[in-house]
Image: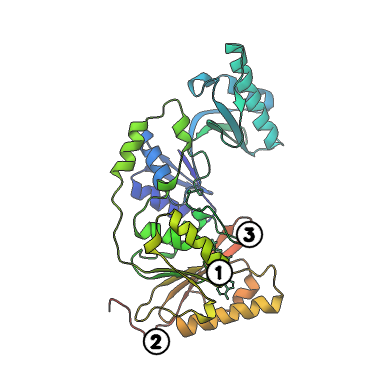
């Protein structure tokens, strides 16, 4: 199987797969491969927080041009995978000079499948790009073509809890990846003081309470496959280790009342109501809980709509606030405004590159000098 993720999250995805018991792991660019049976495929879709999609390769062949692609696709008996009454779609990714148009590759594959059904049954199945019963994935690298079935269906970042979003929401998979990369222990205080729609605090609460990301999903792609085993999926739901009833403080705060209202709706949808505290306040006035230190992971504005000196000053204020009010904290910040970052005035102890959509960002770690504030457990 091939698990797709975002650039920079391959290591955390690898660890997640290892913890799940997947074998023969091989790390690649924006993906990790593993070997597993049907149960592992279902489990992986249900449990992986940093996976976007899980593909199951069914066929591999060498091709030099579109005609060879058409012929090779026709050697697969597609009625083994879906029926006339089902809809399907074809996605393609091409890294080859022999094929210049990715869309044309997908079209050729679609034609080969439709023609095969027509020849066999006198009728054709229909394409549905939004919600197909079967998603077929074509990957061409030089002359090697891999045909896979997409077991996830809609991207796994669409957990199902986030109904509304505020400005510039983080992708859920990226948010989960940031938390896992930070090494947060999942049992100590967690704060996002610029929480927007609440993505980071919700993902953090799900991790701390051992709630699998697939719990809120209505459907996975494999549920409309011919070999779908509903009992196996039910067993996986039931076998899930119980919710971790941990006493932990998770706080989301934002200057915007609209943002905290949206966060609150999303928190309710995720059934995390009493597990996350939401506050409407500018970070400048945020009061950290007494006698407790913890982790902050946050995604401040990048300043697209602000003047240069305004955003630089805001990042300076952030740095001052970190030093003054969050002594002993482990702070992680994601931003693509590299100039503004310099104004924080703190030396990052770790620096990683992540992508927020198309934006290249730095994910920076600031360990704030503890001073006299004591840890809760000391
Ligand atoms: C990039 S968005 C965060 C998006 C969030 N991570 C999500 O997934 O929805 C930045 C957030 O910072 C908030 N913000 C801007 N200035 C702030 C301030 N001074 N104090 C607190 N929050 C602020 C904005 O209201 C916005 O919701």
Q: Which quadrant of the view contains residue 114?
A: top right
Residue 85 visible in rendering = yes
Q: Nearer the viewer, mark 3 or mark 1?
A: 1
x then y, percent, for residue 84: 55, 20
Foreground of the two, 35 or 321: 321
Q: Residue at x 49, y 33 (%)?
A: 57
Which residue matches tag 2? Answer: 371
* Residue 16 placement (x, y as % from top left): 39, 51
Dot 3 and dot 1 residues touching (CB under 8 Å)? no
Q: Look at mark 1 in the image and give the residue it sits on.
A: 257
Quarter containing the N terminus? top left
Secondary structure beneath label 2:
loop
Residue ID for mark 3: 359
Q: Earlier in the sequence, mark 3 or mark 2?
A: 3
* Alpha carbons under labels 3 and 1: distance apart: 27 Å
Crowding around mark 2 (Cα neighbors within 10 Å: few <14, some 14 to 19, many 20+) is few
The image shows residue 120 at horizontal and vertical percentages of 58, 12
Residue shown at 41% from the left, 26% from the top:
227
Q: Earlier in the sequence, mark 1 or mark 2?
A: 1
Labels 3 and 2 touching (C-beta < 8 A): no
Specify the quarter for ligand 1. bottom right
Q: Secondary structure at mark 3?
A: strand
């Amino acid at each position: 199987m091939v698990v797709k993720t975002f650039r920079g999250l391959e290591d955390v995805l690898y660890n997640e797969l290892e913890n799940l018991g997947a074998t023969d792991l091989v790390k690649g660019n924006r993906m990790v491969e593993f070997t597993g049976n049907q149960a592992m495929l279902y489990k992986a879709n249900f449990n992986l927080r940093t996976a976007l999609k899980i593909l199951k390769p069914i066929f591999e062949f060498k091709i030099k041009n579109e005609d060879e692609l058409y012929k090779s696709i026709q050697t697969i008996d597609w009625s083994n995978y879906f029926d006339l009454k089902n809809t399907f779609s074809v996605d393609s990714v091409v890294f080859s000079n022999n094929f210049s148009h990715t869309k044309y590759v997908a079209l050729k594959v679609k034609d080969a499948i439709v023609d095969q059904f027509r020849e066999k049954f006198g009728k054709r199945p229909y394409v549905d790009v939004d919600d197909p019963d079967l998603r077929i994935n074509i990957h061409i690298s030089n002359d090697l073509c891999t045909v896979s079935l997409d077991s996830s269906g809609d991207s796994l970042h669409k957990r199902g809890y986030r109904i509304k979003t505020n400005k510039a929401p983080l992708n859920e998979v990226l948010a989960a990846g940031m938390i896992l990369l930070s090494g947060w222990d999942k049992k100590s205080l967690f704060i996002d003081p610029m929480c927007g729609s609440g993505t980071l605090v919700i993902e953090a609460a799900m991790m701390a309470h051992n709630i699998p990301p697939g719990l809120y999903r209505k459907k996975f792609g494999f549920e409309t496959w011919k070999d779908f085993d509903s009992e196996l999926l039910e067993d996986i739901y039931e076998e899930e280790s119980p919710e971790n009833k941990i006493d932990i403080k998770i706080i989301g705060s934002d200057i915007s009342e609209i943002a905290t209202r949206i966060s609150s709706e999303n928190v309710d949808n995720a059934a995390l109501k009493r597990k996350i505290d939401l506050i409407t306040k500018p970070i400048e006035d945020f009061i950290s809980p007494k006698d407790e230190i913890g982790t902050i992971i946050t995604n401040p504005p990048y300043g697209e709509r602000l003047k240069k000196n305004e955003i630089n000053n805001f990042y300076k204020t952030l740095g001052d606030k970190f030093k003054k009010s969050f002594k002993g904290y482990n702070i992680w910040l994601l931003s693509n405004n590299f100039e503004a970052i310099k104004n924080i005035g703190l030396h990052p102890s770790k620096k990683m590159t992540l992508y927020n959509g198309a934006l290249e960002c730095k994910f920076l770690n600031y360990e704030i000098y503890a001073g006299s504030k004591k840890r809760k457990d000391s």
